[in-house]
Image (spheres, rainbow, N blue to C red):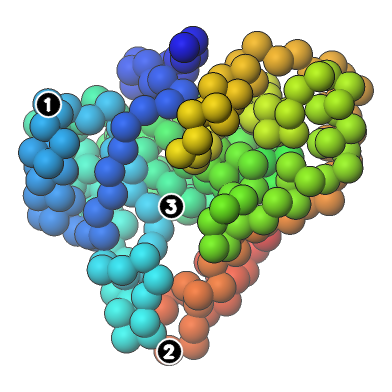
C-alpha cells in the first residue's frame, strides 16, 4: 500500500500510519522509564515520535475525582528532551495542546515540539491552532479525523453530514475518504482507527482522492463542533481544569 510521508521540523520523516504505545506518567524520571519499558515490550530499537498529552492523572483512561495530579509540564518535557538526547526516539511532540499551551511550552522548551496531535475533522477545523503551529513549524496530526465513530465518546455526525455525503457521491468516494482527504489537504497526517481490513484499504484511497475548490468551500461552511470535549477532566476541587473553557483555553 502507498503510505505518504511528512517531514517534521527536526528533519525526521513520519509515515501517515505507524505503530504506537501509551503510558500514563507525568514527570521526567517516569517519562524516561516509560519509554525504556515500551521499547522493550515492543521489541523496537527506537521510537519515531513520542508525545506528551495534557491529561492530568496517571493511571486510568477515565479518572475518579481523587486521581488527578498536579501538572508538571516543564519536568515532563525535560524528560522528553532527555530521551531525545539518549537516542530513544527520533522526535518529540505534544497532544491536545491549545495555542496558548503551545506558547507556554515554547517559553521554556529548548526543543520545539515536532508534532501537535489534536482532534481535527471537517466539523472541527482548528484554523487558529493550525496557524500557530505553522508559525513554529509544528506539524498538526489529526486524531478522530472522521469524528470518532465507534468510540464511546465519538459521533457519526461528520461522515453522516449531508454535505460530506453529497461530495462523496459526486466524487464516487466514501464519506470517510472525503473527510480524510480534507485533513490531508491541510498538510496534516490523519490518525484513523479501524480493525476492518477493507476499510483500512479504503482509507488509503483518500491519498489520491481529488477535491476541488467548491468542495472545500462547502466544507468550510459546516458548523463547528468539537466532539471530544473532555467534560470528565473538569471539576471544581481536584482537577487543574475548572471548566471546559479552562481546559481548552477558550478555544472551544
Q: Disc number at residue 104?
A: 3
Looking at marks 2 and 3 on the same chain, the residue that comes earlier in the sequence is marked by 3
Q: Are marks 2 and 3 in contact (CB under 8 Å)?
A: no
* Residue 45, label in figure: 1
Give the mark toward the camera: 1 or 3: 1
Q: Position of residue 156 (x, y in %)?
A: 70, 51
Closer to the chain start, of discs 2 and 1, is 1
> Can you give x and y, in whole percent of width and height, for residue 29 in the image?
10, 54
Q: State which quadrant residue 121 falls in.
A: top right
Question: Is 85 on the left or on the right of 91, as rendered?
Answer: left
Disc 3, SS? helix
Q: Work out how far the residue at label 2 is from the one at label 3, CA to CA, in angstroms.
A: 24 Å
The percent coordinates of residue 94 (x first, y second) are 39, 44
Task: Nearest to the eye among marks 2 and 3: give it.
Answer: 2
Q: Residues within 10 Å of mark 2 (few under 14, many from 20)?
A: few
In this rendering, would 34 be left or right of 162?
left
Q: Is residue 229 above or below residue 49?
A: below
> Label 2, on which residue?
237
**Which residue is located at x 57 percent, y 62 percent?**
153
| Residue 156 in sight here | yes
**Could you say which quadrant of the image residue 213 lies in?**
top right
Q: Is residue 135 visible?
A: no
- The residue depicted at 49 percent of the width and 87 percent of the height is 236
10 Å crowding of disc 3: few (<14), some (14-19), many (20+): some
Asked if the residue at tag 3 contacts the one at tag 1, i.e. Cβ–Cβ closer than 8 Å, the answer is no
Residue drawn at point x = 8 percent, y = 38 percent = 40
- Give the left or right position of residue 157, taking residue 36 as reference: right
Numbered disc in front, either 2 or 1: 1
State the separation of the CA atoms marked 2 and 1. Answer: 42 Å
Amino acid at each position: 500500500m502507498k503510505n505518504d510521508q511528512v517531514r517534521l521540523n527536526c528533519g525526521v520523516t513520519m509515515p501517515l500510519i505507524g505503530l504506537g504505545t501509551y503510558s500514563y506518567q507525568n514527570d521526567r524520571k517516569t517519562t524516561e522509564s516509560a519509554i525504556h519499558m515500551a521499547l522493550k515490550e515492543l521489541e523496537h530499537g527506537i521510537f519515531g515520535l513520542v508525545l506528551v498529552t495534557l491529561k492530568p492523572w496517571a493511571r486510568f483512561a477515565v479518572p475518579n475525582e481523587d486521581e488527578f495530579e498536579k501538572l508538571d509540564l516543564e519536568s515532563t518535557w525535560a524528560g522528553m528532551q532527555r530521551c531525545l538526547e539518549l537516542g530513544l526516539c527520533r522526535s518529540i511532540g505534544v497532544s491536545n495542546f491549545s495555542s496558548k499551551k503551545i506558547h507556554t511550552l515554547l517559553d521554556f522548551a529548548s526543543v520545539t515540539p515536532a508534532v501537535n496531535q489534536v482532534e481535527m475533522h471537517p466539523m472541527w477545523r482548528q484554523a487558529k491552532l493550525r496557524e500557530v503551529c505553522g508559525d513554529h513549524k509544528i506539524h498538526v496530526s489529526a486524531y478522530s479525523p472522521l469524528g470518532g465513530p465507534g468510540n464511546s465518546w465519538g459521533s457519526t455526525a461528520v461522515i453522516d453530514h449531508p454535505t460530506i455525503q453529497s461530495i462523496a457521491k459526486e466524487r464516487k468516494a466514501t464519506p470517510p475518504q472525503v473527510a480524510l482527504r480534507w485533513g490531508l489537504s491541510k498538510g496534516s497526517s490523519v490518525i484513523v482507527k479501524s480493525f476492518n481490513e477493507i476499510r483500512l484499504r479504503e482509507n488509503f484511497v483518500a491519498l489520491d482522492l481529488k477535491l476541488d475548490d467548491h468542495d472545500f468551500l462547502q466544507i468550510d461552511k459546516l458548523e463547528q463542533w468539537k466532539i471530544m470535549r473532555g467534560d470528565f477532566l473538569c471539576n471544581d476541587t481536584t482537577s487543574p481544569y475548572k471548566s471546559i473553557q479552562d481546559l481548552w483555553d477558550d478555544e472551544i
